[in-house]
Amino acid sequence: MPAPNCRPGALSGKRERRGVRRSAFAVALLAVLTAGPASSQLAPSIAPAPAPAPAPAPATFAYAGELTQGGWLRGTVAGGTVALTLDGAPVEFAGDGRFLVAFDRDAGPSAMLIATLGDGWIVTAPLTIAPRAWRIEHIAADPRPGAVPSEEYLRRRAIELERINAARRIVSGSQGWRQDFIWPAKGRISGRFGSQRVYRGQPGSYHSGIDIAPGANGGASGTPFVAPADGVVILAAESPFTLEGNLLMIDHGNGLNSAFLHCSELAVREGETVRRGQFVGRIGATGRATGPHLHWSLKWHAARLAPILFTGPMN
Ligand SMILES: [Zn+2]
């Protein structure tokens, strides 16, 4: 997506009060991210002001994260910020200036964060979103023909999808988005986020979450799993959904939410507040699943994310 027009004076006639400062810290951080490990925690610093008179308040972004497809960035807006956008779309930020943005599996190669300050200045942070090597399997066959869905299935599915969409619209105010995420369960990773099959050049839909099969043999239905971060339960299916089975969804606030599929049992109810590490359900094979596993997907608004970039590797 091209960067918005943000040259000095582009915003209005009040040229002397409006301008652009590119965050020097952001540029420096990007250099570190390109050269070093994917995740960096750097102390915030203040970019030197370009010295207009009168000097505006210190204004730069400070942030760290996984600037890659399926990844995220947490940061603090410049002092005096009144609005924040990512590629033109409004982004929430908290009273203390903290914010989260995240990048879809197919995002990139660049994005633009723009903060508008109360005094009319804007601060830009151009981001480079590194591509990831998704596991793509080329199949020399046509996709399996699905059975023609019945009227009954279509009717039921529409209700299920509406419940999922309604859950995602809930603004819970949870602050879990600020936390380092933990693994909801440990086990063999039996399906990776983003992997995709291509049938004779026709891409199938990619895997939208990570699959965790508990136990050495992957057969341990009933294994407990926990909330990966603080949140509020926004959906707890009381009867299995056709594809997802017993579905649990937890909102972590600021547009970030988790979904857990195929559960054998849910231990929490809608509206309940949960803490990171709290037992919330048991792994199963309900819905469309070939064996017991926990499918965990993470979304930030419409962006589908790689859970492993929130937790770090399992050990
Ligand atoms: Zn899965």
Image (cartoon, rainbow, N blue to C red):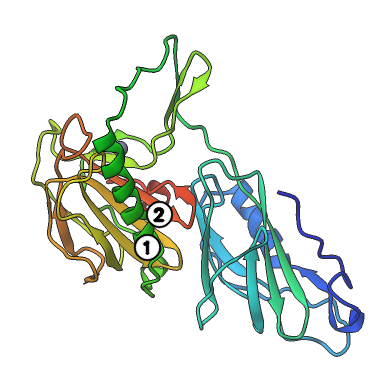
Could you tell me if residue 296 is visible in this image? Answer: yes
* Up/down of 249 relative to 242, above or below: below
User: Residue 142 at what x, y percent from top left?
Assistant: 42, 13
Residue at 71 percent across and 75 percent down: it is: 116
Left of 123 or right of it: where is 100?
A: left
Q: Secondary structure at mark 1?
A: loop
Contact? badges 2 and 1 (CB < 8 Å): yes
Left of 271 or right of it: where is 112?
A: right
View quadrant of ligand 1: top left
Frontmost residue, 166 versus 70: 166
Q: Quadrant of residue 209?
A: top left
Q: Which class describes the residues within 10 Å of circle 2: few (<14), some (14-19), or many (20+)?
A: many
The residue pinned by badge 2 equals 310
User: Residue 39 at what x, y percent from top left?
Assistant: 50, 54
Considering every residue shown, the one lying at the far front of the view is: 151
Frontmost residue, 158 versus 259: 158
Q: Which mark is residue 180?
A: 1
Q: Which class describes the residues within 10 Å of circle 1: few (<14), some (14-19), or many (20+)?
A: few
Q: Secondary structure at mark 2?
A: helix
User: Residue 61 at what x, y percent from top left?
Assistant: 64, 70
Q: Quadrant of residue 150?
A: top left
Residue at 79 percent across and 71 percent down: it is: 21
Q: Which mark is residue 264?
A: none
Left of 116 or right of it: where is 241?
A: left
Frontmost residue, 89 versus 119: 89
Q: Amino acid at mark 1?
A: Asp
Q: Quadrant of residue 13?
A: bottom right
* Up/down of 250 relative to 240, above or below: below
Q: How far separated are the C-alphas under marks 2 and 1?
A: 7 Å
Could you tell me if residue 78 is visible in this image? Answer: no
Residue at 63 percent across and 47 percent down: it is: 34
Dot 2 or dot 1: first in sequence order is 1
